[in-house]
Image: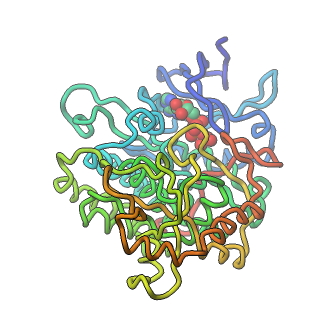
Amino acid sequence: MARNIGGQYTTHRVLGRGGAGTVWLGEGPEGPVAIKVLREDLAADPDLAERFAHERHALLGLEHPHIVGVHDLLVSEGPEGRDIALVMDLVRGPDLRAHLDRERRLAPHDAVALTAEVASALAVAHAAGIVHRDVKPENILLDPVEGGRGEGAGRGFTALLTDFGVAKLIDEPRHGGKGGVVGTPDYMAPEIVEGLPPRAAVDIYALVTVLYELLAGFTPFGGGHPGAVLRRQVTETAAPLPGVPAELWELIQQCLAKAPASRLRAAELASRLRELLPAVAGLPPLDIGDPLAEPTPEAEPAPAAAHAAGAADEDQGPERVAVPLVRGAAPDSERATHTRMRVPDADELAGGAHGTARVIRPAGAPRAGSARHGAAARRRRRLAVTAAALLAAGAVGGWLLFSGGDGDSGDNGAPPGVVERLDEPGEP
Ligand SMILES: Nc1ncnc2c1ncn2[C@@H]1O[C@H](COP(=O)(O)OP(=O)(O)OP(=O)(O)O)[C@@H](O)[C@H]1O
């Protein structure tokens, strides 16, 4: 049933639902729009309404060809209570999650071009002092490109980053709580897991995690319990993707650096990605083994993790092991989003020394730990630590207080905040 919001807008039908509310197809003086109506419990919070008004100026001013424009932020009292709504550009395409569910992987050129578009959007937001804090495929909408010309024409759509607005609103002390960690585990930068304030570099980490996922079909540290995912964010190194040009892989590694200062800034990321487009033109989607489809029966050393630990010589130093990954990292609706938990202490994080890591290989190539791989087999004989690694992975669950699921909130009923104002505009 059509409903009036704030006098000027009418909602018609639901376009989708997220953790913070429901997005409606609506109509306003400017024509069709998308209207995100916040959940009742959020709207009832007087502090939130105040913050909403406070953020209005910054959010309305955020304009870019790859950002979903916010037309208005409405706080209105209706017969059924207070409505808080964001009026946005209506995007006609699906979100990137739905697209990825269908395609599984994108051709490298499409993946790089799309990531460059989002990076250029982040550059503008960061320059305005706004950190998104929840960059993930669900928040990248795809706008169909008509005709054969213009950016995105080859792949049929351009990318638009959304959900800047809900952000700042929700991740305030009352909602996030002091010392709490709020976000989507697969895309969460290690410094957030460690309790540091989120700066622009967290968006770079999340966006390049999305790029990795577009190329690989899975995120670098996803899979299994949200606590295990978070620990991998802090302790693991992303496994290389066979078939990715070296320069692109270097860029991915740099932006997935654990140290935020080592990552590229958004504007530079956008331009470096664009420079790489000719190098990836015409490459087919990667044909790599799915570490989730073929659970490894035994522990295997993970090349990337071993490299990170400086274990170039297989007979030296501590080794980290790969363990079978629990199905769950593949893009699906089961992905944990908006986990809320306390920050693990140093000892708990240190318990991740023997973390889980993926072994990724070209499709059809022998598994690194197969009998055909003598070195791996020798290593495997020496690896009595597998059980310890599994136990360590399980132990992380002990410090996790997560709300889980599809964005349901924790005790205080709040989904995560997704925008953070920077102290100094332009400072990552
Ligand atoms: N501007 C828009 N135009 C068209 N459809 C939209 C728009 N914004 C959101 N949607 C649709 O509504 C769905 C829900 O959006 P929403 O931002 O609430 O969800 P989310 O990002 O998955 O959740 P969360 O708020 O938990 O991050 C999207 O997946 C998309 O399909």
Residue depicted at 70% across the width and 46% down the height:
404
Where 177 sits versus 376, above or below? above
Counting every numbered tag in the picture gives 0
Query: Which of 49 and 90 lies nearest the eye of the viewer?
Result: 90
Residue 142 quadrant: top left
Where 32 sits versus 377, above or below? above
Point out residue 126 in the picture as x, y percentages from the top left corner.
46, 60
Point out residue 26 in the picture as x, y percentages from the top left corner.
56, 21
Residue depicted at 51% across the width and 21% down the height:
29
Residue depicted at 74% across the width and 53% down the height:
402
Point out residue 221 in the picture as x, y percentages from the top left corner.
52, 59
Looking at the image, residue 395 sits to the left or right of residue 133; the answer is right
Point out residue 256 in the picture as x, y percentages from the top left corner.
44, 66
Quarter holding the N terminus is top right
Looking at the image, residue 321 sits to the left or right of residue 349; the answer is left
Q: Is residue 87 visible?
A: no
Residue 235 quadrant: bottom right
Residue depicted at 46% across the width and 42% down the height:
140
Q: Residue furthest top?
A: 1
Looking at the image, residue 121 sits to the left or right of residue 333; the answer is left
Q: Is residue 57 visible?
A: yes
Question: Which quadrant of the render holds ligand 1?
Answer: top right
